[in-house]
């Protein structure tokens, strides 16, 4: 269940909480998943799994964050932001 909280700023958005069900998708933002209680796991094309304290997914890369009850942080950075470079 996506029961955490969101924050929004200029060229970024952030989420903190558990990861709920989701389907493979892609977006223009750079996504940074940060462990807060367990290692985030991100599936790429359904067969490659990235896991670690911090996982970065580039823009337009199809991916799926596996659901977890452990809290995590997600940071979404717009591609035109300096930090995204």
Image: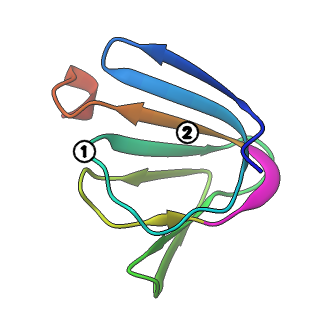
**Coordinates of residue 48 in the picture (x, y in percent):** 45, 82
**Coordinates of residue 35 in the picture (x, y in percent):** 67, 46
From what the image shows, is residue 58 above or below residue 75?
Answer: below
Q: Toward the viewer: 38 or 71?
A: 71
Residue 35 lies within the magenta run: no
**Coordinates of residue 55 in the picture (x, y in percent):** 49, 53
Helix, strand or loop status at disc 2 = strand
Quadrant assignment for the C terminus: top left
Please give the count of numbered marks on the rendered protein. Answer: 2
From what the image shows, is residue 82 above or below residue 68?
Answer: above
Q: Residue at x 55, y 39 (%)?
A: 74
**Coordinates of residue 27 in the picture (x, y in percent):** 30, 49
The mark lying in front, picked from 1 and 2, is 1
Name the residue that disc number 2 marks: 74
Q: Residue furthest bottom?
A: 47
Spatial CA span between label 1 and label 2: 15 Å
Q: Is residue 27 left or right of residue 74?
A: left
- Badge 2 crowding class, 10 Å Cα cut-off, few under 14, some 14 to 19, many 20 or more, is many
- Span shown in magenta: 66-71
Residue 26, quarter of picture: bottom left
Residue 61, quarter of picture: bottom left
Q: Is residue 7 left or right of residue 35?
A: left
Q: Residue at x 54, y 46 (%)?
A: 33
Helix, strand or loop status at disc 1 = loop
- Badge 1 crowding class, 10 Å Cα cut-off, few under 14, some 14 to 19, many 20 or more, is some
Q: Is residue 79 left or right of residue 16?
A: left
**In contact (CB < 8 Å): disc 1 and disc 2:** no
From what the image shows, is residue 72 above or below residue 13?
Answer: below
Q: Residue at x 53, y 28 (%)?
A: 14
Name the residue that disc number 1 marks: 28
Which color mode does the image show? rainbow
């Amino acid at each position: 269940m996506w029961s955490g909280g969101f924050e929004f700023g200029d060229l970024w958005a952030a989420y903190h909480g558990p990861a709920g069900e989701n389907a493979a998708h892609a977006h223009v933002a750079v996504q940074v998943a940060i462990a807060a209680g367990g290692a985030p796991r991100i599936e790429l094309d359904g067969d490659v799994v990235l896991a670690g304290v911090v996982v970065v997914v580039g823009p337009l890369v199809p991916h799926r964050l596996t659901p977890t009850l452990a809290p995590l942080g997600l940071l979404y950075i717009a591609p035109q932001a300096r930090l995204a470079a």
